[in-house]
Image (spheres, coloured by chain):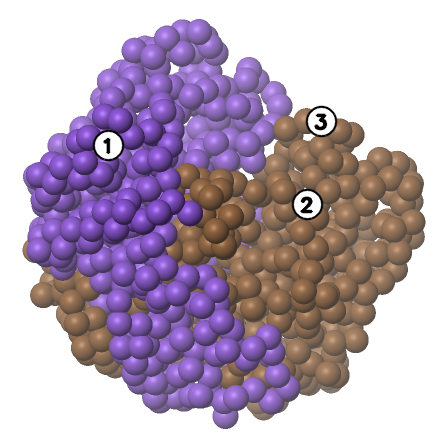
Chain colours: A brown, B purple
């Protein structure tokens, strides 16, 4: 019988063997990049393994049986980012070394809300923050940061600290002049969601240029029009197109603003370019930010979550300071017991820093950079394939690893077909591929016309150019097939 | 070379072997429940393994070497909840089956923000929510919920949804009458932190009785004094004493309030009693709540995080609804593709539901209940040992698995010794045990006098009564030793 705390290594070793076998069996069951049949079929299979609505019985079915059945179901029922035809989202295949490191964390179960739940892990997080701060161009001795659940939490922290920083007044809690939040139209939805949560009011939308980058002239005009304290969110790697805002120019505009300003850079996607000697120049200006969001579960190949929030100094963090008598009493802090409680909005906090630390130490910057470069090369290859196929049209230039495009049928239809019909066709291509279990291709609406576009986010450095060519051929062939079908 | 997506099973199997070996080696290095020497010594050892300030080199040190060295360091440098002398916090030794299930999630890397990143995992979360809702006495067919990072996030969601629910106005974003938040003095600090974040203003502190339970008469008076919409946070399992507020009476008081009311129950600790046939009666009234926080990384033996947020219906959730063109466009939702994006404040979201699902299915309610009962028996045994030792005094009755007590030296000192001297002595006992690597005993300040108390939180069902007796004997002997030392 499983009793926590008893011979964990032996029992764990046996159960890990069961899980690995079931992962493999589920992969064989699945065949393709995701299960076929769409949500109804997938749900039916999952529900059966989960007890058909009776997940929690009195007696249970035993460790090995439950683990085997449910892991096989999960594996068969996953969209597998390790399959080259699973290419929709910033959803990466994790490095085995990071997965194994994460297992150690699960087994030891440290929690960063007090030193006495995480003696060594406290230092691990501090060192990971320093290493990534240095990579981002900050002074690692002065930088302050934390590991988060992802860009959404990091952006929320940037808003929380930044809205406190420039105007001193914070958000809905009043006091001080109102801080305006400005973000481009291509910024992540979490910026608007976070501002709303914090009572910061409507985010001012700054227009983008044709390449999905923030229009700095428009930003300057918006800042001048507002006049008061401003928090500008720039994006390094937009969700739809992977575009990187002109960070240096934006930083200059914020510095030139006569009222207090704060620049938060959402580099959840683009931050991965820091590992690449070839591509890190794309992020010039990043070090001028007042706060930065990175996500190593994107271009960093970590199991989620592995978000990072960085600031060049401790400015603004007083907003998060908290003292709890059972976690960080003042006399213990004075006695040298460090507390990370004020580094996060969470209390219990798994040290996701550990898998990151092991990955950084294992691969080094060069090998991580080579993985980023491989994804970038795949994206450029995809763009070339699209431009060579008259049925497909590239919708935005490739910056990192995102390829935004449309199926346009043929030149004739491109001229005479209605926008709406093409939108329906592109949306249908994705759903057909999903339902058949053939491919996971992204889809979004972008641009002033709100047209439906398809998207590849190429985060699998083990995929080959031939894989990408074949995936795009499948997309085009599916479009042809759907265009030839009588409309429903 | 590690390439994500290539033969993951083989390479992962080898690396897991490395991690398991290093976990064992680190345990042997450590000897006791935590590393000896205090923060300076622990940091020195950790830093050396982390590259002495050069975590990220150009070339890296290779997967096996980095994983072995850092995992051994983490294991040696952990406060191990599987050691019976590690008993300070709601910090549990995880079940091996949950750890193995979590490995499958790391390997497949699904994310719940869209169906096409988590086809089967979407159903897993839905079923886990339904099973736990039913356990909590809610109608599983109507209940809505989500898996969270813990009580802090669950409490934030309760405040967010609840402040929207009763008054309709939400927090700092204005509109509608102001919602008052009321919580007992023994409630978790995250309630005040969450209310501040959301701009809900000062939380009204309701006094507690001598057993750390909310004084319902005082709650009624506070509600009457306020008059307007009210959000009451009750606690089932306080952090300091494990006390459970009288949920049924509180629910009645909220229902009798003439203005709109919302009852959120923070059962992050006490919710575990639901598994036990003997103890579930302690939570009578829980099903009358409008929202509930549970934490299965406490009395549920999951690796963190495994928080749960539940509501009996979809009421209030419109506050979280969100549509992102790249994740859940309306036409795909209409086509039957489910979206959990509106279930969480996060975007990328690891399915922590999976390890919970495997655990529930494997152990069933009876075996989980037996683990809860075992911890409860250990806590009662601890109370008996304390009451039999004149050097120790029990500070609060035992409800679940928390034992709040003080070292009081002897009867003579209990009468004549100063409060301040005893506070210093109790604080010193904990720090001495930490520095020696001998035990992790909790400490808090509680009660109207703000005295320093020691605390055992007994979450290790594999610990024996003899372990608990020996731990308390060590605490008392350390107190004797410190009391005999000349004051610094």
Q: Which quadrant of the figure has residue A135?
A: bottom right
Vertical arrangement, residue A177 with respect to residue B228, above or below: below
Q: Nearer the viewer, residue B238 or B101?
A: B238
Badge nearest the viewer, 1 or 3: 1
Badge nearest the viewer, 2 or 3: 2
Q: Nearer the viewer, residue B467 or B96?
A: B467
Q: Residue at 40% across / 11% down in the picture?
A: B222
Mark-to-mark CA distance, 1 and 3: 50 Å
Callout 1: chain: B
Q: Which quadrant of the figure has residue A418?
A: bottom right
- Mark 2 residue crowding within 10 angstroms, few (<14) / some (14–19) / many (20+): some
The verdict on a common chain for dots 1 and 3 is no
The verdict on a common chain for dots 1 and 2 is no
Residue B46 visible, this orientation: yes
Q: Residue at 56% across / 77% down in the picture?
A: B52
Mark-to-mark CA distance, 1 and 2: 46 Å
Q: Residue at 41% across / 39% down in the picture?
A: A325
Determine which residue is flagged by label 3.
A175
Please state the horizontal and vertical placement of residue B381, each as a whole percent of the image: 9, 44
Query: Does residue B176 appear left or right of residue B138 in this picture?
Result: right
Please state the horizontal and vertical placement of residue A299, each as a whole percent of the image: 59, 73
Query: Does residue A436 appear left or right of residue B399 in this picture?
Result: right
Q: Earlier in the sequence, mark 2 or mark 3?
A: 3
Determine which residue is flagged by label 1.
B413
Determine which residue is flagged by label 2.
A316
């Amino acid at each position: 019988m499983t009793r926590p705390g008893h011979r964990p290594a032996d029992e764990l070793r046996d159960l890990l063997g069961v899980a690995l076998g079931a992962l493999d069996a589920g992969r064989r069951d699945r065949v393709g990049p995701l299960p076929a049949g769409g949500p109804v079929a997938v749900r039916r299979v999952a529900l059966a393994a989960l007890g058909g609505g009776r997940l929690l019985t009195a007696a249970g079915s035993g460790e090995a049986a439950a683990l085997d059945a449910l892991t096989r179901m999960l594996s068969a029922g996953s969209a597998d980012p390790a399959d080259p035809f699973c290419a929709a989202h910033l959803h990466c295949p994790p490095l085995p070394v990071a997965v194994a490191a994460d297992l150690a964390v699960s087994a030891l179960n440290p929690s960063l809300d007090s030193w006495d739940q995480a003696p060594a892990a406290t230092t691990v997080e501090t060192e990971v923050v320093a290493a990534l701060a240095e990579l981002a161009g900050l002074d690692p001795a002065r930088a302050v940061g934390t590991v988060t659940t992802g860009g959404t939490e990091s952006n929320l922290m940037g808003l929380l600290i930044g809205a406190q920083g420039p105007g001193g007044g914070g958000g809905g809690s009043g006091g001080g002049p109102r801080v305006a939040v400005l973000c481009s139209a291509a910024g992540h939805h979490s910026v608007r969601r976070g501002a709303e949560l914090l009572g910061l009011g409507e985010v001012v939308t700054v227009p983008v240029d044709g390449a999905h980058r923030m229009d700095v002239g428009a930003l300057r005009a918006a800042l001048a029009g507002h006049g008061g304290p401003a928090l500008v969110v720039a994006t390094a790697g937009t969700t739809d197109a992977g575009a990187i805002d002109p960070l240096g120019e934006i930083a200059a505009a914020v510095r030139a603003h006569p009222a207090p300003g704060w620049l938060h850079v959402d580099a959840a996607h683009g931050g991965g370019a820091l590992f690449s000697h070839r591509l890190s120049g794309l992020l010039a200006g990043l070090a001028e930010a007042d706060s930065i969001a990175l996500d190593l579960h994107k271009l960093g190949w970590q199991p989620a979550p592995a978000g990072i929030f960085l600031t060049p100094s401790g400015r603004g963090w007083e907003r998060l300071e908290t003292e709890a008598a059972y976690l960080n009493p003042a006399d213990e802090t004075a006695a040298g017991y460090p507390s990370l409680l004020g580094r996060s909005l969470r209390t219990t906090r798994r040290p996701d820093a550990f898998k990151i630390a092991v990955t950084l130490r294992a691969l080094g910057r060069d090998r991580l950079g080579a993985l980023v470069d491989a994804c970038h090369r795949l994206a450029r290859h995809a763009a070339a394939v699209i431009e060579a196929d008259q049925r497909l049209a590239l919708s935005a230039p490739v910056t990192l690893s995102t390829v935004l495009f449309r199926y346009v049928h043929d030149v004739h239809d491109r001229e005479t077909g209605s926008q709406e019909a093409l939108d329906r066709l592109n949306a249908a291509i994705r759903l057909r591929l999903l339902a058949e279990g053939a491919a996971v291709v992204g889809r979004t609406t972008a641009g002033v016309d709100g047209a439906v576009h398809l998207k590849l986010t190429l985060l699998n450095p083990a995929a080959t150019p031939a894989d990408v060519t074949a995936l795009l051929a499948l997309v085009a062939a599916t479009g042809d097939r759907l265009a030839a079908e009588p409309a429903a």
